[in-house]
Amino acid sequence: MSRVTVDPKQMNGVPCIRGLRIPVATVVGMIAEGMTKEDILRAFPDLQAEDVHAALSYAAEAVRERELPLLHAS
């Protein structure tokens, strides 16, 4: 079973971790805010360390597949 799942009937098809209602974007956002893997695992006891890695890998692949506009500092 893939750690990242997409189910149109759950969370409007947003990529989630292992069918849980924990979106990949939430996990990646927590890391971006400076939380450690341990912090995230404490916040979401249903997650496993491998889930955090899978969320980052999924996000990296999603960015590779799509060109995002860069914001220029003014």
Image (spheres, grey):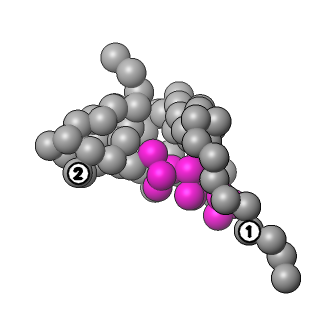
Specify whether 14 is left or right of 50. left
User: Residue drawn 58% across and 42% down?
Assistant: 66
Please say if 8 is above or below 18: below
Label 1 environment density (alpha carbons within 10 Å; few <14, some 14–19, many ≥20) = few
Of 32 and 13, which appears nearest the observer?
13
- In the rendered image, residue 34, in percent from the top left (x then y), is placed at 69, 60
Please say if 74 is above or below 53: below
Give the label on residue 11, or none.
none
Please say if 6 is above or below 27: above
Quadrant into which the N terminus falls? top left
Of 51 and 57, which appears nearest the observer?
57
Label 2 environment density (alpha carbons within 10 Å; few <14, some 14–19, many ≥20) = few
For the residue marked with disc 2, what is the amino acid?
Answer: Asn
Per the image, label 1 sits on a secondary structure element best described as loop
Of 66 and 35, which appears nearest the observer?
66
User: Residue drawn 36% across and 41% down?
Assistant: 16
Kindly give the residue lying farthest to the top in the view shown. 1
- In the rendered image, residue 37, in percent from the top left (x then y), is placed at 61, 45
The residues colored magenta run 24-34
Give the label on residue 12, or none.
2
User: Residue drawn 63% across and 46% down?
Assistant: 67
Per the image, label 2 sits on a secondary structure element best described as helix
- State which tag comes first along the sequence, 1 or 2: 2
Q: Mark 1 points at which residue?
A: 71
Contact between labelled residues 2 and 1, with CB atoms less than 8 Å apart: no
Residue 46 shows in this picture: no
